[in-house]
Image: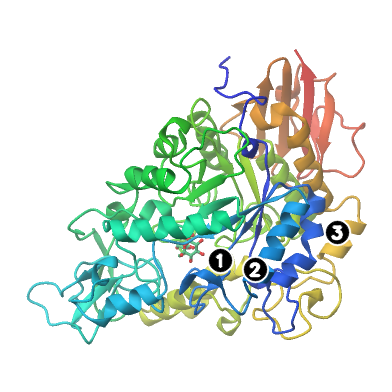
Amino acid sequence: MTTSATTADESPWWQKAVVYQVYPRSFADSDGDGVGDLRGIIDHLDHIARLGVDVIWLSPVYRSPMDDNGYDISDYEDIDPLFGDLATFDELVAGIHARGMRLMMDLVVNHTSDEHPWFVASRSSPLAPQRDWYVWRPPREGFEAGAPGAEPNNWESFFSGPAWELDEASGEYYLHLFSRKQPDLDWENPAVRGAVHAMMRRWLERGVDGFRMDVINLISKVPGLPDGVVHATSASGSPLGDGAPFVTNGPRIHEFLREMNEAVWADRSAPDLPLVTVGEMPGSTVEEARLYTDPARHELDMVFTFEHVGLDQGRTKFDRLPLRVSRLKQVLARWQDGLAEVGWNSLYWGNHDQPRAVSRFGDDAAYRVLSAKLLATVLHLHRGTPYVYQGEELGMPNAGFARIEDYRDIESLNHHREATASGVAPGDVLAALQWIGRDNARTPMPWDDGPQAGFTTGTPWLRLTPGHEQVNAAAAWADPDSVLHHYRHLVALRHHEPAVSHGDFALLAPDDEILWAFTRQLGSTRLLVVANLSGADLDVSAVTDGWRAAEVISTNYAASKGDWSGTTLRPWEAVVLRRTA
Ligand code: TEU
């Protein structure tokens, strides 16, 4: 049996922590404009605190034209008036700290808004001193600016269409991996890096405790920006190629992260340092994650992998593939093994970019409550830092809007426009959005069974998820068997049982498509997790042999602590057993 590099006792605080993500637009609206705000979060802090979580990750609240709901920032130093102001932000920080929690801010520095003064200056002239803060290039040789295919290279934007936008005035193009209102900063420029570091220091001085770094593994691009493999043509006639290999985990990424550490928090060695960092890293392998999260390298505490949320997707995220449970289990197990000795995992099912976990991996019809609890049990019993996305603790299903008019997300709207223009049947495009579109999980938080679910007294910016009369926070707190109380129990279990936070992980029955089973071990304490991912009874005696006398420390069936057979799991049942030696 291997022993882990860090034990529960000497580990940094965030290895025993659970993080709760707040998507501010949709958490709580205090002023009736239909959009959530900082005051709304302050008013509902006790909901989060009662769950027992340690950290709040707040999606962006900075000044923004809201082309991508705040991931397009026009002023890193101020709060958008839609959400409040700096004084209210300070109140929020104080309210979080007063409840013993910490605050992790979203750091979006691969790109800014095109309305950020840096970009406005950069765009003003090819001779502007800030021209080289962004990635400007002339048209492709032999092409007139603006002609199809004249883009400096063939990269496709993550939000559909070419990743370049022409600036008519100068005849040059700027790079935008996301929307055209999100120009990429040029991290090759030391002045850009210095400005980002200074901005981060100011937020730390203001009292924030860490950063979730948006697409941070995309900031270093391969020099020369070479064309990618062509796979399509845009609606405007430009060939579209895959730029990901040239921007993902690029040549200077490790250097940039290390430099950031040195510039922003010189000494990370103090064990009680409140700081925590997580890098969002689409396209990173476990080997790369080990480098990013090796404490000796001073880069990041943990990263968000995308491997497990890409298993049901084809070449693009909208191509749906059947999900195989065995693959899902094996991918997560590989990340457990890969970061067992060096590094650390973050654990998540959902966030503001992913559909609702219970709709994607569970059964949101007949077994919504049980399968939501099962998914929570399985994830929270892995080794790593779990993230709970607002509404997940209520077992919220996908919004599943059937009409394009109900969608607000730029990614979904762009995809709908491009796909229908290139001949895909509108019904097929909508079906994909109902399954994977980001608005599925961006709907307002349902607080009670009142009008607009208690989210707003006005008209919500995005329609509510159907079913809020039953699925809401007030109902969940009142019901001891709710998904919410199960999350509270799992958070407490992580805090009190060191084998949950730090035990070694071993996957059992890796090829089974229905049974998800694994063990955790720390010293003489052993845990066995068994979960039935189906609506039929499942005989699990093969893995519970030797565990008959073990204590049941978690179950998702109401009040069944004492009465589990030890051999058969009921539909969507998940049980955790503990024994010593
Ligand atoms: O997401 C980046 C990302 O890789 C994807 O999850 C993205 O949402 C998209 O689905 C790719 O097809 C981050 C933020 O979390 C997201 O909300 C932003 O839109 C994006 O970066 C740009 O800042």
Q: Which residue is more in the foreground, 221 or 518?
A: 221
Q: Is mark 2 in CB contact (under 8 Å) with mark 1?
A: yes
**What residue would you read off at disc 2?**
24
Of callouts 2 and 1, the N-terminal one: 2
Q: Residue at x 67, y 36 (%)?
A: 16
Instruction: Indicate the amino acid at tag 1.
Output: Pro
Secondary structure at badge 3 equals helix
The residue carrying pointer 2 sits among few (fewer than 14), some (14 to 19) or many (20 or more) residues within 10 Å by Cα, namely: many
Q: Residue at x 65, y 81 (%)?
A: 461
- Disc sitting over residue 105 in the figure: none
- Residue 327 appears anywhere in the view: yes
Of callouts 3 and 2, the N-terminal one: 2
Q: Quadrant of residue 562?
A: top right
**What residue would you read off at disc 1?**
60
Locate residue 443 relative to residue 316 in the image: left or right: right
Q: Residue at x 75, y 19 (%)?
A: 545
Q: Which residue is more in the foreground, 181 or 420?
A: 181
Q: Quadrant of residue 493?
A: top right
**What residue would you read off at disc 3?**
476
Instruction: Indicate the amino acid at tag 3.
Output: Ala
In three-dimensional space, the C-alpha distance between marks 1 and 3, rounded to whole angstroms, equals 28 Å
Secondary structure at badge 2 equals helix
Return the x and y of residue 47 as percentages of the image width and height: 80, 58
Q: Quadrant of residue 219?
A: bottom left
Return the x and y of residue 451 as percentages of the image width and height: 83, 81
In three-dimensional space, the C-alpha distance between marks 2 and 1, rounded to whole angstroms, equals 8 Å
> Disc 1 vs disc 3: which is toward the camera?
1
